[in-house]
Image: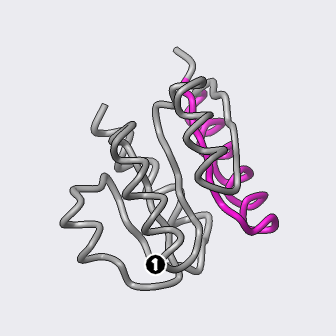
Amino acid sequence: MMIRIMICDDQQQERKQLIRDVQQWCEKRTQPALIEFCENWPDLAEKIKSCKPDILIIANNGVAGLDLVTNALALMHKILWFSDLDFSLQAYRLCLSYFCKKPLTSAKVEYALDRIAEQR
């Protein structure tokens, strides 16, 4: 079964790293995946409605990331959130699937995806 993963990150280098990390995670598990990406809320809202992703990864920094997460929760619930600020309390209050503070590493992305895959 194909899994659909949406990545939202406004930093191109970081987004490329996330895409590579997600692809590696999928390959290790022989999990076919459709990986989409965007940079901001208007694009994200449109893609969530049209692509209906199984997992959403948000990695925008600061309050912009918090705003994205808050808005996205109205459309879906399996959200992995990476931020440069410690929003762990907000993530807990929003009942997010997973929160982790940046910097992004392959190990952090893999662990987050493992955690959310267990929730299926």
Q: Main secondary structure of the magenta part?
A: helix
Left or right of 35? Residue 16 is right
Q: Nearer the viewer, residue 107 or 57?
A: 57
Verify whether residue 19 appears in magenta: yes
The residue positioned 66% from the left and 61% from the top of the image is: 9
Q: Is residue 38 left or right of residue 76?
A: right
Q: Secondary structure at mark 1?
A: strand
Image coords of residue 97 (percent x, y): 31, 52
Residue 37, quarter of the rendered image: top right
Front residue of 109 and 45: 45
**Mark 1 neighbour class, 10 Å CA radius: few under 14, some 14 to 19, many 20 or more:** some
Q: Residue furthest bottom?
A: 85
Residue 93 included in the magenta stretch of the image? no
State the image coordinates of residue 105 (x, y, percent, origin top left).
Answer: 61, 71
- Quadrant that contains the C terminus: top left
Q: Which residue is mark 1?
A: 101
The image's colouring method is: one colour
Q: Which residues are magenta?
A: 3-30
Task: Give the image location of residue 62, x and y in percent.
Answer: 52, 80
Q: What residue is shown at x 48% (from left), y 59% (from top)?
A: 68
Indicate whether 30 appears above or below 25: above
Residue depicted at x 58% and y 53%? 41
Up the image or down, 87 lies above or below 73; here it is: below
Q: Given the current orientation, which residue lies at the most extreme front position?
A: 42
Q: Quadrant of residue 43?
A: top right
Q: Position of residue 79 (x, y in %)?
A: 40, 49
Q: Nearer the viewer, residue 70 or 118?
A: 70
Q: Amino acid at mark 1?
A: Lys
